[in-house]
Image (cartoon, rainbow, N blue to C red):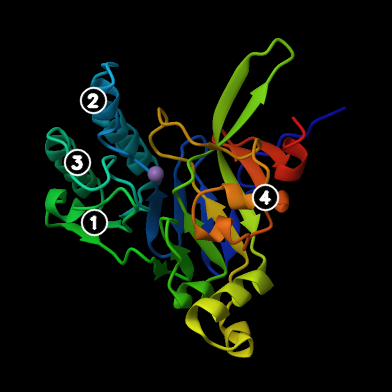
Amino acid sequence: MIYKVYRAPYHTVKLGSLKIKPLVPYPALLLEDSIRALVIADLHIGWDIELSSRGIHIPSQTFRLKAKLREIAGKTGADTLFILGDVKHTIASAELSEWRDIPDFFDEALELFDRVIVVPGNHDGGLELLAPSGVEIADTKGILWSGVALMHGHTWPRLHLLEAKVMLMGHLHPTISFRDPFGLRFSKPVWLRIPFDRDKLIEVYSRRLRRSMEELTDLVRVEKLIVLPSFNDLLGGQSVNSIGGSDELLGPIFRSVSVVLDEAEVYIVDGTYIGKLSFLRAF
Ligand SMILES: [Mn+2]
């Protein structure tokens, strides 16, 4: 069998004059219009501290995240940075070294970009205390930008976000894992591009907001959900090919089965398209 390997710009999505481009080979996405905005998710700064509390000591990884951000900023010339949540790792509080590493990361980001905007995630409690004043902290339930919905994914997005045709989220840290005939396992972070089940979504919002299906049918235009891989490549994630169904994945959109997971297109971060999830589940 001959496998065809697709590379960028095959998976660029066009939305009017806006281009949505995964930045192969980085776990980052570029929104390209009159303004160029870079989108990343799930930094989990402070994750290394949790490891050290379990006896595994590795140096702080923040310098690697900063170096990767600097490299991408230089290559794209983007002027705006969106972080789709989970800048922090500890959920409710902040560890001592987060008081050093998070402001340090943001200082670098503010040097590289005109605007730095965070859509907070479930790990970002108290982030406003750690963010320098130039950092903009947006609505936890997501924001619209150039016709694209941006959110973390741990909560239902605000209704008006469903007017966007494309929604971007983090939260899952999606990975794909395989086991070879010798029992060796490997796992790789991936991008997911998934069609929404629009009828299901309308039904859920109608129930949640007590609004009629007809009224919502006119409002809801969202077609695709793009799930970003984690920007911090040392983190683990949810293996999307070894689950039974969408409801085993994190976040209300998946749990309510408002997307057609079998139709999800899976891309490794290096740009390789590896097929639809229904096919990859067979492994
Ligand atoms: Mn996360």
The answer to whether the beta carbon of the residue marked 2 is less than 8 Å from any atom of ligand 1 is no
Q: Is residue 199 above or below residue 134?
A: below
Q: Does the residue at mark 4 contact the one at mark 3 (Cβ under 8 Å)?
A: no
Along the horizontal axis of the image, is 48 left or right of 221? left
Q: Nearer the viewer, mark 1 or mark 4?
A: 4
The answer to whether the beta carbon of the residue marked 1 is less than 8 Å from any atom of ligand 1 is no
Of the image marks 4 and 3, the number of the one nearer the N terminus:
3
Q: CA distance from mark 2 to mark 3?
A: 11 Å
Amino acid type at circle 3 is Ile
Q: Nearer the viewer, mark 2 or mark 1?
A: 2
Q: Does the residue at mark 2 contact the one at mark 1 (Cβ under 8 Å)?
A: no
Residue sitting at x 45%, y 50%: 170
Residue 148's spot in the image, x, y percent? 48, 66
Q: CA distance from mark 4 to mark 3?
A: 33 Å
Residue 282's spot in the image, x, y percent? 77, 34
Q: Looking at the image, can residue 214 be seen?
A: yes
Q: Residues within 10 Å of mark 2 (few under 14, many from 20)?
A: some
In this rendered view, identify the residue nearer to me: 160 or 124: 124
Q: Residues within 10 Å of mark 1 (few under 14, many from 20)?
A: few
Amino acid type at circle 1 is Asp
Q: Residues within 10 Å of mark 4 (few under 14, many from 20)?
A: many
Q: Does the residue at mark 4 contact the one at mark 2 (Cβ under 8 Å)?
A: no
Residue 166's spot in the image, x, y percent? 55, 64
Element carrying mark 4: loop
Along the horizontal axis of the image, is 62 left or right of 4? left
Amino acid type at circle 4 is Ala
Q: CA distance from mark 1 to mark 4?
A: 34 Å
Residue carrying label 3: 102
